[in-house]
Each structure stands twice: as structure tokens, then as C-alpha cells.
Amino acid sequence: MGAGLGGLRFEAQRLRSVSSPVSPPAMARRSALSIRIVEGRNLPAKDITGSSDPYCIVKIDDEAIIRTATVWKTLSPFWGEEYEVHLQPTFHSVSIYVMDEDALSRDDVIGKVYITRDMLVEHPEGYSGWVSLSEVDPDEEVQGEIHLRVEVQGSQGGRRLLRCTVLEARDLARKDRNGASDPFVRLRYNGKAQESAVVKKSCYPRWNETFEFELAEPTEEKLCVEVWDWDLVGRNDFLGKVSPRSHHRCQASAQLPTRPCLPSQVVFSVQGLEATGQEEGWFRLRPDKSKPRADERRGSLGSLQLQVRLRDETVLPFPSYQPLVQLLCQEVKLGRQDGQVHLVTLLDETTTAECRQEVAVNLVKLFLGQGLVKEYLDLLFELELAKPCEPNTLFRSNSLASKSMESFLKVTGMPYLHAVLGPTITRVFEEKKYVELDPGKVEIKDVGCSGLHRVQTEGEVIEQGRQHLQSYLGELLDAIGRSAPACPLIIRAVFRQLFHRVGERFPQHQHTKFVAVTSFLCLRFFSPAIMTPKLFHLRETHADARTSRTLLLLAKAVQLVGNMEPAAGRAKETWLAPLLPALQQGIALMKDFITRLVGTEREEEEEGEGQPPGPPTMVVKEGLLFVHKTRGKGPVLATTAKKLHFCLSGDTLSFSKSPSAERSGAIALGDILAAEKVEEKSFGSAHVMQVVYVDSGGQQETAYLQCKCVNELNQWLSALRKVCVNNPRVLRTYHPGVFRGDKWSCCHQRERTGPGCDRTHHGVTLQEWSDPLDPATEAQRLFHHLLGLRGTLREKYWELLEPEDAQNGPRGEGAPLPEGLSRLLGVLGDLEKCHHLAQPPAPPAPALLQLQT
């Protein structure tokens, strides 16, 4: 897979009307795109220092969705950032731009990777590897769609005419400094060209102009439609053209009956056009591929290591998955039985290492929603402890038990993690102390003022580093020790079970049950978050080299405390010896903490265990947002404050003057109609969102809220869309601009309450650990995984049978299977039939006029 390979069909989502509600579908079709940006290498230097400050922007169909952190002063940056974006199945491409951040001027573009949807479909298991960056050609940076009507008509003189009506366009590229373009359309046919009027300052122009050409004989000549940005000085900028693969299929809309839909392949005959009278639809604009390209720089811009996977999902209503869910729940409730191969064991043995993390997350979320996560994890503990194992290697492998416990902590314990680690991590970032204990890495620098300076000795540098590190470690261990009452009840209950199970399995090694708890809490939860706080949302940026080294040493110290054997760690890295007294004290504190964490089971804990993490009114997202004042009414617009603290919960979007102030007002989630981005030119900022809602008087109003960065903007949009997903009044179209004076700034429409000029993006969301549980999606992903293992499950069952049991009966295809596995295979077969019935029939392919490539 490389940059700039091929195009693909565009299939648009159903056109939506502003005034009409959305009916919840019987089943959901969506795409989930997993992206992991690992690292870059051999990037070109963009700064006078001979280095660069690289970061990445991920765009889905030319819309910025993700911005990685900047890695300063390096040509081989490491990011390690991972995202999952939920999209409508109609997206076209993913572009990953590598940028160089500049404080005093516009950021430089280093290069990009362009990946089409077709390319991702060709790699169903995902793509992982290095991809060369390609140079960014302005003429290829096109976007948007154009709405055309094409027909063949006869004239009074017996001549036939090819008539093309250019109606409108949307989401065109912004070529001018004002954040817009001045678009016009050029049509060419049979050696003749015609042009439309120029629409000033709009990326959503409306022309409604008709152009006629005398139809050539024979009818093999092709029509070319191009969109350009008009410039008073200099050459016009190319905005895109219609090509044979530009057209997308849309579904007929009851609200817009005048927009019939064309097939996905635009290779049409005049005879077919005459038979239908006219054809109309939206066409995706494409780059001009006929222009020769200079590829000599390809490969000299460095490369990115990526992991990308596309998953197209058809999610049936949850009742369809009930037989599968009930079977899994029944197997968990039955628990481990001697002499039998459990379904969970089969799943663990047949799932590859690459898939185990994802399967673990889905199982944890599914059983969490069913109130059985404690029983599920306890079953995994039993099955793991039943294997031959040593106390010092317990739960150290990446088994399903280890991955499930790791996922469980992230799903249920992220607020707890932030509360415990947050203050110490912030202190490390702010103080930027030099901490080093390894003599081989110590940097000796001058100390003291001018005229009195002297060179520090290696011992002094190490002692100073030890004091700083010991201070951070002491503060962190103290926070952990005091956090037992604040730890979520469900986490405490699971650790209590683990503690007792391991104690029963190794009665002669009572030390092991403490290590079993810390192997998850310290080694798989606290330490990774300390080393890379950006990936656990503890910080918005990656640490610089000095801070990163401090965090690494602090994480290593926490790991040694978690191992509860500091001497073992000191044997490998003898330079940690100065920290030994602090580690021994930390081990004592950790043992005391675990004793309290897994303390006596209380009645109120039992009431909370097994339930989803948090009530429906839990806080989903909160933070300060700048309010842009516009003409209008409503709770947000009535306030005089320019910056408000917003809090999104499971039932309202509320706001106040500060986090601690009394609530000033709120919008019920049922009254929120859309959450969308706003054009940069509207307020001079690229990070403004609009929340369209209905006020108490039934009037539609819009609040314009500015975020501090593109990531915060997309996180707010994602959160709002998730909590409003079941709102039947959500809009289908919106205006990306603002209504100023007597018209919309985006499309220049003069009707303030008219239909929007672009489609809403309510299906585009980012996956977060704090997402509400979605049992249908979790069950669908487990079904899809198990479906691919049907044959392997049967084979693995006979393989795992104990020899004495295998000798008592026949084996192979005709041999009877245990009830659980037999029922599972039957349920999978029934679900497979349901999915086949749910697939829509293939649409007919009418013929139309061929358009030029």
C-alpha cells in the first residue's frame, strides 16, 4: 500500500432535510477505522537547526479528525498513538499528513500518505508496515461534490442537444486566505467550452445554470465538467473535475424527490439517457490525473509506520444476538468444571495474539452490561490457575485472562487512574528536573553563577537525581496508598476474588497473592500510564526527552515495587541500588494498600458490583468553551459570559460561569438536533462547533462554541453525537457557516430556516474507553470473530481433550460435541442466516452518458 493509489466509488448517505426527523433503522451499517500511527523515519529537516518538529494530521475525506502530539527536534519521531473512528460506510479515503510545527509562521507540510477505501478493503485483516511519504500537489488537494442534471433533448430543427444543468456544489476546497473560494464551473464538449458565473466567497455555491451543446454524431464524445477558483491576480486554482468514478449512489429521499440517484459507475449511453428522460445526482470531484506528475521526490520525504484496519459492520437489533449472549452468560455462570473443555478456553486457544486484545475488550464490555463481569473474570482466573504455572510467572503472559483484566481496568478505572497519577505526572512535566541514575548516561554540566561555577561530579548528579526521583515516587505511592476507598467498587471486588483464588492455589507462597494484584494494577495499568501519559489522556502532549527519561525511571520504580522484590531488579540494573531503601519502604506501603483494597466484603459493595460503570447521568465530557455571540435567543445565547464551563451528562448539556459555580442553564439532549463543525472564515478560527437545538418556545437556535484545538473539537462533537444517537429529531442537513445580515455565509441562501447546504455527520465518532456500553455492537463483533473460528473450535476441542476422555468415545466429524460447543455452532449458523437476510438487494444499474476521465 502506498500514497496516491487509485480511487474508489463514492456511496453517499441518504440526503437529509432540515425539517424532517430521522427514523431509527432496524439495523445499523457503519464502518470502523482503526488507525495506529507508530513512528516516522528519515524525515527531511524543515528548521534552520537541521531538524523538524513533526506531528500528523489524519483526514477522513478531507476533514481533519485527529492531530497527534508534536515530537520536538527529531527526524525520526515516535508517536505510538492509536485511534478508532466510527464512520458511515460511504467514506472514500484516509489521508495522513506529516507536518512541521512552526511557532512564528504557518506550519510546513512534509508529505502525506493517501489510502483509499478500496485499498483497505483489499486488506481485511488490516495493513501494518512502512509507507513512503509523497509530495503534496496543490492540484490534487481537491474535495467536495457537485450536483448535476444531464439530459438529451430534441430541438425544432431536428438537432439533438446535450443539456447539463449545474445546480450547486458543497464542501469545496478553500483556496483563498479568507477561508473560502470563488468557484465557477467550466464545461467542455466536442471542442467547445462554456463557463458559469463566479460565486464569490463560498465553498457551497449555488448556480442553477443550464448549458446546451449540440450532440455530436456518433455519440462517443465525452462531457468534461471542471470546477475552478477564480483569482483576480494570478492563475485560477483547480478545485476538481468529474470523472468516471466520481459518482456515488444515494438513496431516494422523500424530502428531496427532485434528486434522483445515479449508479456508482458513470459510464452511460445516450440511448439510456433518452429512455429515462434525464438523470440527476451528486458527483464527487477528483484530481486531474491526466496531468503528468513529477515522482522524483517520492521516497525522499521519509516514511511512516502505520497500522490501519477497516471493518465494515452490519449490526442487527440486540434481540437478534440474545441467543449468543445468553449462551455465553450461561457458560460463565456454570463456571469451570473438572474434566471438561470450557468454551472460554477454546476461545483463548484459538484467538491469535493480534486479535486477543480486541476480543478481550468486547467480552469485558458485554459481560459488564450483563452484570457478569466479576463472574467472567473469576472464571478466567480459575482457568488460568488450573494450568501448570509457577508463582513468579503468574499472569505475565498475554493470555485472554491478562488481556481481559487489562481491558477491564481501562474501561472501569480511567477516572481513578487520573485521580491517583494526575498530580504527580503534572508535577514532573512542570518541574522538568534532570533525573538520571545510570552512570553511563549521566550528563555533567557546570553549576553555580558566572565566575564561581564548577563542574558537578558524577556522584553529585546521581544523588540529585535520586532525591528528585525518590520525591516523585514517595508522592505517588502515598497517593496510591490513600486511594483504596476511592477505587471503584467493581475493581475492588474483582481484585478480592483474584487475591483469594491465588492464595488458595499457592498456600505455601502467600507473597504471590499480593504480586498477582500488583501485576495488573502496577505493571499493566499504572506503569504504562506513567511512561506514556499522552496515550492515557493524562497529558495533551508527549514528554520531551528529559521528562520522558524521568517518567521512564519513575515507571520502572513502580514496577519494582509491584514485583515486591527490589533485589531482583537491582541485579539487572545495579545502578538502581541508591533507590533500594525507598523501594523497600514502597513495598511495605503497597502491601498495606492491597490489604485494604481487598478488605472485608461489604454489603453496599455487593449492590454496586456487576453493574455498568456509572449511572445514566454520569458526566460524559466537561470543559471551558468560548461562546461566540450571534443573533438569536435560547439559554446559551442569553448569557453575558464569553467563556462558560460546559458539562455533558446522560440527559443534558449544562453550563455555568465556572466549574464550581451554580448551573446557569441547560439543554435537554432530546432538544439537540445537530453537532457540527463551522467554517473557519465564519469566526476566524478552525476549532468552532455549532450545537443546533430547540429552545423552550419551540424555535430552532444555534450556539457557536470554540474549542482550543482540533482534538478537543472532535472529542466534543463525538461525545455530543453519541449521547444524542437515539434522538429521532436529529437533522439531516445543516449550514457550515453563520447567518449574517440577510444570508448564510456558506451558501448565500437568504432563508434563515431553509434546508442546510451540507449533510450532517452524526455517524462520525471517536471510540473512547468511557463510551457508553453498546451491547449490539459488542455482540456483533464477537459473533464475527467466532464465525471465523467455527472449524478451528471443533479441532481445538478434540486436541484439548484429556487422553483418557478421548479414548472413551469416537472423535472426528461424526463424533458428538459437548452441549455448549454444539449450541454455539448452531447459534452462529442462525445468526449468519439473519445477516444474509438483512443484506439489501443489489440495485439495478441504469445506463447514462459517459463522462471524461
Image (cartoon, rainbow, N blue to C red):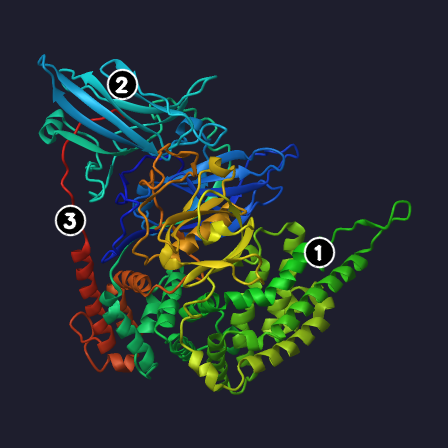
Is the C terminus in the top left, top right, bottom left or bottom right quadrant?
Answer: top left
Which image quarter: residue 148? Answer: top left
User: Is disc 2 placed on a helix, strand or loop?
Assistant: strand
* Residue 569 falls left or right of residue 492: right
> Measured along the vertical axis of the image, is residue 308 above or below residue 363?
above
Q: Residues within 10 Å of mark 1 (few under 14, many from 20)?
A: few
Q: Amino acid at mark 3?
A: Pro
Label 2 or label 3, whichever lies nearer to me, is 2
Is the N terminus in the top left, top right, bottom left or bottom right quadrant?
Answer: top left
Q: Find residue 468 and report its horizontal and vertical position in percent.
A: 73, 62
Look at 52% across and 52% down and name the residue there.
639
Look at 25% across and 76% down and name the residue there.
820
Camera-side residue: 151 or 269?
Answer: 151
**Residue 768 in view here:** yes
Q: Amino acid at mark 1?
A: Glu
Q: Residues within 10 Å of mark 3 (few under 14, many from 20)?
A: few
Query: According to the image, label 3 marks what residue?
Result: 841
> Measured along the vertical axis of the image, is residue 162 above or below residue 514?
above
* Residue 473 falls left or right of residue 317: right
Query: According to the image, label 1 marks what residue?
Result: 431
Tell me the CA gap for discs 3 and 1.
63 Å
User: Is disc 3 placed on a helix, strand or loop?
Assistant: loop
Asked whether disc 3 touches disc 1, contact meaning CB atoms under 8 Å apart, the reply is: no
Query: According to the image, label 2 marks what residue?
Result: 188
Task: Choose the circle earlier in sequence order: 3 or 1.
Answer: 1
User: Is disc 1 placed on a helix, strand or loop?
Assistant: helix
> Measured along the vertical axis of the image, is residue 707 above or below residue 103?
below
Look at 56% across and 56% down and name the residue there.
657
